[in-house]
Amino acid sequence: MSEPADGCARAVIVALHGGGMNAGYFDGQAHPDVSLLALGARLGYTVLALDRPGYGASVGRFPRGQRLTAQAATLRAAIAAFTARHAPGAGTLLLGHSFGAKVAFAAAADNGVRELLGVDVSGCGRRLAVNPGLVGREAGLGLRRLNWGPLSLYPVETFQVSQSVVAPVPAHEVGTVVAWTRLSAGILPRVRVPVRLTFAEHEAWWRHDDEAIADLITRLSDAPRIVVDRLPDTGHNISLGWTARAYHLKALAFAEECLARARLTAAQEF
């Protein structure tokens, strides 16, 4: 967690890591420009990066992780408890990467998070671009390409410190990835806040051609606003590369736009 120096948060950014990573993904130590936690706090945001069930300290309790709906319920409870204590009344933006994007969508469905401003996701589409049998496999040369893309896109130190970030994928997550096309058809139409979708140039897990993105947008039928961004010179692990700062700044700018929309809506109610 990181907080602004004055302790007064513009909003809370809840960051959800992908499969095979832990919450340290959002506090990359390879270069000062990479950390979302550091940047968010400097710009006035409280940033909460959570270890999802099956990662970090929760491994003992959830050795197989949790299925998607259960994770969404756990997340909702965690956000409610955190904001009540640290930032009562502040709006929340869910920022999810890869599997964390799926959890963000599921938690946002049916207005499940109070004071929710929007959802910002990366590394996640609806249609897999790879053989589903690759999901959950141990690391290898092929998976390295899928997870990272060209290694030159990342600070050299990334691969020296990444062992503290990489974690096994819990068993319950593997089936969810494969079933996401079906699951998302029921979840995405129930998201009723602005959504921002970012696709890395070298994203290889998920299809992000025009047809696939159009299908994704169509499913988000109740979202009042949808922003699609393509980030060049970027691999799947978007928050660890040289373009991480650009992505994080755009995500925080989206949070500002969502804050402005929330204030305007509130003013119109009077």
Image (cartoon, helix red, strand yellow):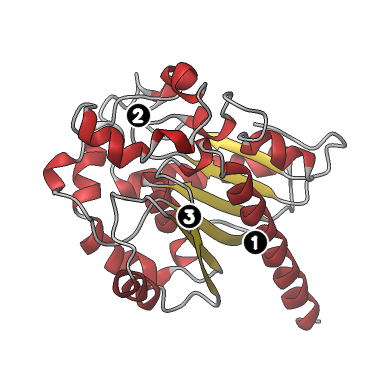
In the picture as drawn, the residue positioned furthest to the front comes out as 152
Circle 3 residue = 121
Q: Dot 3 surroundings within 10 Å: few (below 14), some, or many (20 or more)?
A: many
Label 3 sits on what residue type? Val
223, 86: nearer the viewer: 223
Please tell me whether mark 2 or mark 3 is closer to you in this view: 3
Q: Earlier in the sequence, mark 3 or mark 1?
A: 3
Please tell me whether mark 2 or mark 1 is closer to you in this view: 1
Say above or below: 142 vs 162: below
Measured in 3D between alpha carbons, the distance from the residue under mark 2 to the one under mark 3, in whole angstroms, is 21 Å
The spot of residue 245 in percent (x, y) is 63, 43
Say above or below: 144 vs 249: above
Label 1 sits on what residue type? Phe
Mark 2 lies on a secondary structure that is loop
Mark 1 lies on a secondary structure that is helix
Q: Residue at x 34, y 63 (%)?
A: 208
Circle 1 residue = 254
Measured in 3D between alpha carbons, the distance from the residue under mark 3 to the one under mark 1, in whole angstroms, is 11 Å
Q: Dot 2 surroundings within 10 Å: few (below 14), some, or many (20 or more)?
A: many
Classify residue 173 by image quadrant: top left
Q: Earlier in the sequence, mark 2 or mark 3?
A: 2
Q: Residue at x 32, y 48 (%)?
A: 68
Specify the quadrant that holds the C terminus.
bottom right
The spot of residue 81 in percent (x, y) is 60, 40
* 220 left or right of 29 in image: left
Circle 2 residue = 54
* 111 left or right of 63 in image: right
* 40 left or right of 247 in image: right
Measured in 3D between alpha carbons, the distance from the residue under mark 2 to the one under mark 1, in whole angstroms, is 30 Å
* 121 left or right of 212 in image: right
Say above or below: 99 vs 108: above
